[in-house]
Amino acid sequence: MRFSSPRDRILGITLEIAYCVVMYLALFAIAILFNILGG
Amino acid sequence: MLLRPSKKDYAAILHYSGQIVAGFGITMLLPLATAFAYREWNMASAFALAMSTCFLFWLVTDRFFYTKRELTWFTGMLVVTLSWALAVTFGAIPFRLSGFYASFVDATFDVMSGFTTTGLTLIQDLDHAPYSLHMWRQGLQFLGGQGIIVLALTFLVRSLRGAVKVYVGEAREEKLVPSVRSTAVAIWVVSLTYLALGTIVLMIINLWSRMALDRAFLHALWISMTAWGTGGYAPSSLSTAYYHNVAAEFVIVCLMILGAINFVIHQAVWYGQRRELIQNFELRTFSAVVLFTFTLTYLGLGRSDAFGSLASRFRMALFHLISAQTDTGFMSIPSFALKHYWGDFATMALIIAMSIGGLACSTAGGIKAMRVGLAIKGIVLEVRKIMSPERGVVYEYYHHVRQHILKDNQVKMVGLIALAYVSTYLSGALVGLVYGFPLVDSLFESVSATANVGLTIGITSPALPVFMKMFYILQMWVGRLEFTAVFVLAGFLVALARGR
């Protein structure tokens, strides 16, 4: 089968890891919010 | 009327199952090589015996049942169930011979737990297990994440006629590319790439923590295998608490999330459809579910007063929630701490997360985010139909690589599969109650087994009654194959009994 180019693949992997980091930060923001609200 | 297979169908089922079992036998070369490298002769002979059994089965089926007959949906499903049953039985041979399992049932339990990427374990004295045994346990979960049928289609069975039927039978509904074999290859390319990346990063962290070079490599490889495979086996009885390292936990969290993402999305993003990460309906649903279940978990931990500071509470909630939501099963605390310090609210939040699980066509289990999203869209569609003019035509759309219209039969299938999952969750909980375990504990362990998670609240141990072990084995199996293939096997047995 034909695979994507190395550039596409590296960019794809970077974006997927970025998605994980964004999720991490979003969850951290929720934690801070509830700490402020006293939850 | 239920159909009974003809003699030619039986030949096809045994012939193709034999090929898949032979492929499974080849995978034992990796632990066998590890046994030789570390001079673990007892384990080397155990793996050699198990491999020989697999090849003997293949030789017999190839000699007496050779056929070029194409698989039907019915026989394809039976090939899947038979291959899984045989692989679990033959895979348990090295476990039982290792001396780390009290019985063959315990060994079978761990192979099923490994293959289904569950992570519940009945091994005794894990911390003193030989390296080759660790390689086999961790490798089982990596293989199980991809699926043994995918493994066979990729490397072994070039002439399987009707391959799509066994591919779908292993709960893989979507193809990444038009050909089934190319799809299987693409799944392996994605998996091996992330396995290599995870191993390199975790190895650097292990070396930084002053681990010896070979142990740093092996631990990094093993944890990457089971984090990506959303399996949850670890080479230590402390699970990931053994590493006691925030950086390692962060890498493991990333691997678990990536492992729970649909292979179709990986493929799309790698081929330049980068907006899929934002637009994909299933990934959006998954993200929303994670935000919701994390909030519940975090609030629940606040009620139990066990984790005072923001950092410790966040770290505890994040790691276990992601481990539960992606159906992995890593724990950074012992099971008794989960039972006594988390409280019922946070525990219920984990149960909700485990029951929903990750994305379809990934290494994760559970009902799946796609089904939850489609169910919500189905409800919205019905409400919109009622509120629209009677002659009006109402549609609901969702984006998954391309735009789709929600169809009635999709909503019906979502309802049926979700009902099957919930019924199995409750059945396991009832069995736990019969044996005297508390309700929340029984439900937790039952959901963990069916959704192929592996988090334990302390019920799963070698002292578990044999019937519960067998029931959990069945739950893990039906949960991984998403019911259809196992139901076809049940239908086949009914047809046999009726004689039609």
Image (tube, rainbow, N blue to C red):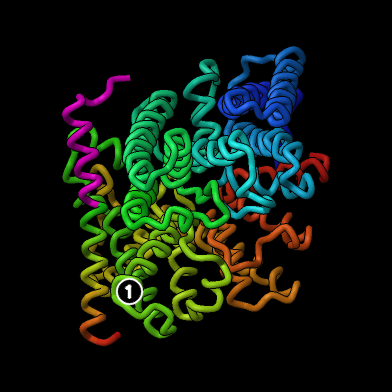
Q: Tell me the magenta residue range.
A: A1-19
Closer to us: B47 or B174: B47
Image-quadrant location for residue B137: top right
Disc 1 residue type (three-letter): Thr
Picture residue at 62% right of the left edge, 23% below the top: B36
Name the chain under label 1. Answer: B
- Where A11 falls versus B159 (above or below)? below
Question: What kind of element bears circle 1?
Answer: helix
Q: Which quadrant is home to the C terminus of chain B? A: top right
Picture residue at 23% right of the left edge, 54% below the top: A21
Q: Residues within 10 Å of mark 1 (few under 14, many from 20)?
A: many
Indicate the position of residue B444 as horizontal and vertical percent values.
56, 69
Q: Is residue A9 magenta?
A: yes
Q: Is residue B18 magenta?
A: no
Q: Which quadrant is home to the N terminus of chain B? A: top right
Q: With B261 as the anchor, is B277 left or right in this view? A: left
- Where B5 falls versus B232 (above or below)? above
Observer able to see residue B329: yes
Indicate the position of residue B295 as horizontal and vertical percent values.
32, 74
- Where B119 falls versus B264 (above or below)? below
Residue at numbered disc 1: B295
Q: With B402 as the anchor, is B223 left or right in this view? A: right
Secondary structure that dominates the magenta span: helix
Closer to us: B303 or B419: B303
- Where A36 falls versus B44 (above or below)? below
Image-quadrant location for residue B157: top right
Q: With B202 as the anchor, is B391 left or right in this view? A: left
